[in-house]
Image (spheres, rainbow, N blue to C red):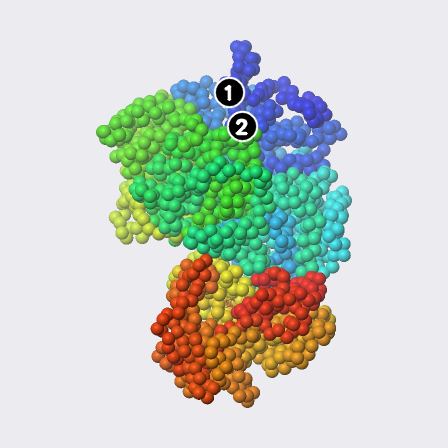
Amino acid sequence: VFSLRKQSTHRIQHEGYRFYICNLSADTIVYKGQLTTHQLWLYFKDLQDADYETHIALVHSRFSTNTFPSWERAHPNRYLAHNGEINTLRGNVNLMKAREGVMKSKKFGDELKKLYPVVEDGLSDSGCVDTVLEFLIMAGGRSLPEAMMTMVPEAWQNDVLMTKEKKQFYKWSSFAMEPWDGPALFTFTDGRYIGAILDRNGLRPSRYSITKTGQMYMASEVGVTNVPDNNVTQKGRLQPGRMLLVDTKVGSVIKDEEVKKYVSTSRPFGDWLNFQIGLEELHAAHKKPDIINNVVEKERVPVETDRRLIMFGYTVEHINMLVLPMVKDRKEALGSMGNDTPLACLSTRNPLVYEYFKQLFAQVTNPPIDPFREKIVMSLACPIGPEDNILEPSAKQCQRLFLQQPILTLKDLEVIKATTYNGWKTHVIDITYPVCDGKGGLVPALDRICEEAASAARKDYTIIVLSDRLAGKDRIPVSSLLTVGAVHHYLIKERLRMKVGVIIESGETREVQHHCVLLGYGADGICPYLVFETISSLRQHGLLDSSLTDDIISDNYIAATERGISKVMAKMGISTLQSYKGAQIFEAVGLSDEVVSKCFIGTASRIGGCTFEVLAEEALQRHVIAYSDRSCDNQIILNPGNYHWRSGGEKHINEPESLANLQDAARTSSKHAYDKFKESAMNAVKYCSLRGQLDLKFPEVPIDISEVEPAANIVKRFATGAMSFGSISLEAHSTLAIAMNRMGAKSNTGEGGENANRYLNQEEGNSKRSAIKQVASGRFGVTSSYLANADDLQIKMAQGAKPGEGGELPGYKVSEAIAATRHSVAGVGLISPPPHHDIYSIEDLAELIYDLKCANPQARISVKLVSEVGVGVVASGVAKGKAEHIVISGHDGGTGASSWTGIKHAGLPWELGIAETHQVLVMNDLRSRVILQTDGQLRTGRDVVIAALLGADEFGFSTAPLITLGCTMMRKCHLNTCPVGIATQDNAVIESCKDILSGVKIEPIHINLKINNEIRTFATTLSYYVSKSFGEEGLPDKTINIKLTGTAGQSFCAFMAKGIHVELEGDANDYVGKGLSGGEIVVYPPHDLPDSFQTHKNIIVGNVVLYGATSGKAFFRGCAAERFCVRNSGAIAVVEGVGDHGCEYMTGGRVVILGTTGRNFAAGMSGGIAYVLDKEKKFSQMCNKESISLEAVVKDVDVKFLKQILEEFVESTGSNVAKEILDAWPQPLGNFVKVFPHEYRAALKKLNKKLVPELNSVIKVEKSVTNGPSIVDIEDSIPDVEKSQKNLDRILDKKKGFIKYPRNNNQYRKVDSRIGDWSEIHNHGEVKTNIKMQAARCMDCGVPFCQSTNGCPLGNIIPKWNDLVFQDNWKEALERLQQTNNFPEFTGRVCPAPCEGACVLSINEPAVAIKNIECTIIDHAFSEGWIKAIIPQHRTGKKVSVVGSGPSGLAAAAQLNKAGHDVTVYERKDRIGGLLRYGIPTMKLSKQVVDRRVALMKEEGIKFVTNCEIGKDMSPHSLLNESDAIILCLGSTLPRNLPIPGHNLEGIHFAMEFLEGWQKNQMGNNNVYLDAKDKDVIVIGGGDTGCDCIGTSLRMGAKSITTFEILDEPPVGRAENNPWPTWPRIFRVDYGHEESKLKFGEDPRHFCILSEQFLDDGNGHVKGIKAQRIKWTKGVGGRFEMKKIEGTERIFPADMVLIAMGFLGPENSIINELKLNQDPRSNIQTPEGTYLSSMNKVFAAGDCRRGQSLVVHAINEGRQAARQVDLFLMGETSLAGPGGVI
Ligand code: SF4
Ligand code: SF4
């Protein structure tokens, strides 16, 4: 019959026809229908027949989340009904298909193939499980219970209490099949047996009762049947991983232990396990240890010269930010502020294929797991290699290699490659192809690899190693991910996958994301050899701690990877790697169909995209950069700024220009500034996001503006993002709230709560109340009053920056203010569970929506989701769950701290999410029920319009409003329907309490009522009215007393306010006392239960009781199920027993447990105290002791509390258990264990200094509300306590560096000592002593403005070298510096440091002393002898001539020589250096510093020709003829004159003439120079040159020095039109001014002064200047106009006048001769962004092209021109572009 069912299903069903057999069983009848429970009886008439009898019934009614439910998919299936999700479905189905290749059946023989495919197409996850279950029973000879145990095993791996036999069974069965993992309650029957099994996490409720008359009822709630209480003998629940079975034939209930004992002793599993193979055995059997040692101890190539790193796309960030922290700290490093870089398909930086994949995560339909606090359910252990026939149980199944985790060390892999143990053999497949095959080589290589893998499997090889070891100069590696995906799917298709294990040996894979994607697409083992070799090399070359042996390196890296993989699996709710493997829990963004259908079959890739050709081209480009013969800037590891923005690197949405423009626009309210912002923001969006790729279509005739919604209304659709007070300052948080309130928009509390003062005391026009109040899994500060004072209540199911993850705020960051707002104790760490830890299904969410609606009937209930494939379906479920508002967040938003893996690779763009959600809601007729909002890096009106067109009604902004506030990246239902209704019972109660609620009377009242499980969220709306009327304080205790009998529905007494006391005789379901806010709950069993009913062995309340309770009391006479008191922060509870995960994440309150606990008690518990009665002394094993200690209860304060509370408990509930304890008091005290969190103890100690150590006072302190600034929010904290502590321990504190340490302004020697000599003014010695402290001031900004458009023109990687200096790592600091700057010794001395003007600190503080740090690094390097000539290995034979040896010429020459060209520099003067030589005086830049550099350049092969003026000594044309290219670096040397009367008089000179003459003389030229000795010197013109004239003439012995500046005296601070981060035009005192003041008693500068005439002394020599004061006013059109001030005329005596008014442009002779185009300012013209002039081969750089500018700009010009010349000559270049990026 089974065969008939299968074959007919395969044959008859085809497209266009529906065919489905319910079942053909003689034992069960399946009624299937898309019916409500009421309709069921009406539709199936036989069910109404009185003669119809059955001894079992299995009914399934569910909340349909499927978009398009169908009859076939309706439950029950043939064997089972299922409440839950199979998260690993795709992998399970693929492996089942693969298994078909190795299955054999004696029973079916050749017919077996006709049963294939085992899993039929088009089934739901439950349908798939059902078919496999059916198959295991029918073809595999398994009993129904055994088959269920195989598919849904318990968490056996880490269970120390599990019996040996059971463990052996589970291990054996894991060799045969991977778990079908996910939250699930399976109920099943074959007609004889009926039972249920719960998943390993226990993520579904299941309650049962057994009667005296021999019936058993099991349902996901109590109260669904009306069994009289006096007939009940037992009330229980199904526990995680447990099975409940009834044998109807024998008429008995078989307990979990019995069933499993029977199954696990049914075969000799223990003996069979002796055949398993472990890595240790392979190592032991390995005959050639020398091979291994060679591999490991080999001399490693230095990292800088390891070209493989570049070929495999390594960057400095990968090594420093990802790999090194893993090796050093055994965990991944953390990042924050979201991900604002381009999607891989938009990046121009050759991303690896891994980057196209986005991790999926659980939201709503199943919960993510906390892999750390709940690690007992996690396991990375997997058997790999050939799988035997699952249909015939035997020892053969065990002959597989059992890996504890998937990362293989170099040694492991060598052993596996060489093994012959037990007949195993390994085939290594080369996954590279010849470079000469070009980009066309990729696909054939993939085909060849797949075929070779299939052939190896056919030849009975047991392991295939896919290796790219041969990749190098001549061979390109095929992406390891493409290879694994293609091979895995090919082998599945060929039914060969189960015959071999697939291991990848790749240089490409290095980070957690890579490992996860490889595993997700089928890899069994991974050897990231290049990681191990790189770290080893760093150590061998002294760059890493020498104590890190190879074994420690691999061990640490593996430990970090294990953590990382667990975290990625956990966010999807998957707990075992065995099920995660091949499950493809990813979505691809930007990969074409051809790639997906070959390598990633079944993966969603919605927008199509890159083809094999593009991927091959990008691999080729990486290879070219890596193996170019010429050693250019690619000799170093690349650093394109994927993680931290850097000039010239990868694009980021939050780039400095855009941020600065937005701030400017916000500050000045100017349209011009906004337009600038719009332009830069739109550019950023274009490069980074999907919406940037969209164009708007406009109709030919636009509609009239009057028809458009007015702007004032549009802004009402805006909301600020959920940023907690704490993650941003109180001031910023309340400012946003005020702003939003004023314009009728909404601000959001974030999950950190809101101080009651803000919503209770609202000041008109300045209200700080946030309209949206968030309720997150952490439940921080969620009280009845908080909920009652919201317009929107937002349930945060996921967070854009790190969907699926929780967070942690270390205790030392929890200030009193944060603690008070979050209802905790200062100093106690706050661990946030993964998002909505208490929501296991859509039903649970619907319940929370209902709860919140009850908690505030006026509020709109919003649910926040994050974009991923399928979010539309989830949103439909959420809409069906009666949410009124749904937020779809993009992956890129958020500020939360998380591992980089989460930030970079989880979640999808909001564009995809909002479009999908809108469309799915429309298709399901649900769109009109909800309002949709989207957020994620929204910036401009265009973003809003696109979001609206894709389906959004409202728009959330987070970063942008913060930026407008000055952040610099530092990092009612409108439908008039009543969607949820109000619990009717509550209405009656509320009515009874009217007088109290209105304040008419406050005498206690008493109400008696009956309750049933349909009445949910009892007393919550009542609490709303209490909170609205009486605020946080509520009512006096026991003002409203309600006595109930019956079974309470879910969320009984949720958020119950103080003053309400509820007593329930009966039992209750899940979520009792959720968010309890001061109320009191008492639950005890019905009085008429039989005497034999032992309350402490029976269940009375369900899962997740007192979740997030903040205060109040709860007494339960009986046991609670799983997750009791999770996130309790202040309630006191007594219960007679609890299930798994009790008191998890608890931060406050007291819990007394008078019976057994489940496993993992106190995981993540950081506060509060639990007292557990441990008669059997087993509690210690059940406890997660990471954050707590276990103590005896001996202290008076504990004993007193315990006794008092037990007396109260007995009085309230009549508990026998407690009474017996009290009767024997104090003897039972010895059986109590006190669970005391370490951090709590420390916090209490502090408090106790201030307070009487009474428990109640402590609890009061927990509740006290104070105001004050905060530090960090839960999501934004850095949970790396250890590391943070280490940082704090450092002598210097970099975290608060700029607050603690002042800027060192003593960069120059003392004035009185320096004015007497010509040595450098810089005080190098003192600067260096203080430099680490100065480096500590740098905050390593998320967006380092210091290196931006307005910051360092070279894009110097300032924060990095600052940090390296701070760490004393001078060598690496030097490397970073040289990446962008050829001559830091020049810029470090003469650059005016625009970087410091743009430094974020400079907004409110003195900037970081960047220039000093720069100079110190390079000087230190010279003094250490690290700077050596680097002679290029390859010469191209191309000749390049550089005309001019100033900074641009030298930079161009240095770069071109590096690229292997023959470079000659022509200088018309007698020495090399241009401006550096003669324009800058020696006290600012010692000429020895210039000579040192020139000498190095000579040594490197650059030829210098001096005294050769092109155009005079040599014709430009002949130079052109003998060169392959020339670069004109002529400078801007035509000085601006002052043609006023008398300008021809003697004694009037240009500044350069003066400076040059003297310096030549100083160098021994013996020339005549202009001497200022004893003269009255007037310098006309400010600026650096003017200052140099002051310094020089002063040292020469001038009699007086005066300077004229025509402009106004600059303001002390920035003017409005000079916003940060532009160069600050402010009043500065430079060295010359300082010196002059000391010598002559006053600052030499005169501002607003106009020279009118040079006066003649009668001998043709100047004797003075007639000058007049002027005034600048704004004239027509806003232009500044100069006006003379009458009567201010004055004569200034002068013997020497120095004109320092700047330069007009380059000298013209060469330009004219070559007939080059010039711009209007007479500079050489080149098209924008290029350096090629109007003549072929002739390039221009520096001041002659750009106009007069800074030395740093000139160096930048030289570098960039050189790059273009190299490209021009060679067709490709590896010289660095802007910002040092290649
Ligand atoms: S070169 Fe100038 S702008 Fe750049 S970091 Fe150095 S001092 Fe700052
Ligand atoms: S130098 Fe200033 S702007 Fe640059 S990273 Fe440091 S603090 Fe930020």
- Label ID, residue 1771: none
Q: Nearer the viewer, residue 583 or 195?
A: 583
> Quarter of the image holding residue 303?
bottom right
Amino acid marked by disc 2:
Asp
Q: Is residue 1369 above or below residue 972?
A: below
Q: CA distance from mark 1 to mark 2?
A: 23 Å
Q: Is mark 1 within 8 Å of ligand 2?
A: no
Q: Quadrant of the C terminus?
A: bottom right
* Percent x, y of residue 1321: 45, 78
Residue at the disc numbered 2 = 925
Q: Is 1223 displayed left or right of 493 in the figure?
A: left
SS at mark 2?
loop
Tell me which numbered mark, 1 or 2, is placed earlier along the sequence: 1
> Quarter of the image holding residue 99?
top right
Question: Which residue is found at the position 39% from the left and 65% from the top?
Answer: 1611
Q: Is residue 153 above or below residue 418?
A: above
Q: Is 1412 displayed left or right of 565 in the figure?
A: left
Q: Residues within 10 Å of mark 1 (few under 14, many from 20)?
A: few
Q: Is residue 513 visible?
A: no
Question: Which residue is found at the position 65% from the left and 45% from the top?
Answer: 609
Question: Which residue is found at the position 55% from the left and 31% from the top?
Answer: 922
* Percent x, y of residue 461: 73, 46
Amino acid marked by disc 1:
Thr
Question: Which residue is found at the position 71% from the left and 28% from the top?
Answer: 115
Residue at the disc numbered 1 = 37
Q: Is residue 1003 above or below residue 423?
A: above
Q: Residues within 10 Å of mark 2 (few under 14, many from 20)?
A: few
SS at mark 1?
helix
Q: Nearer the viewer, residue 1443 or 1129?
A: 1443
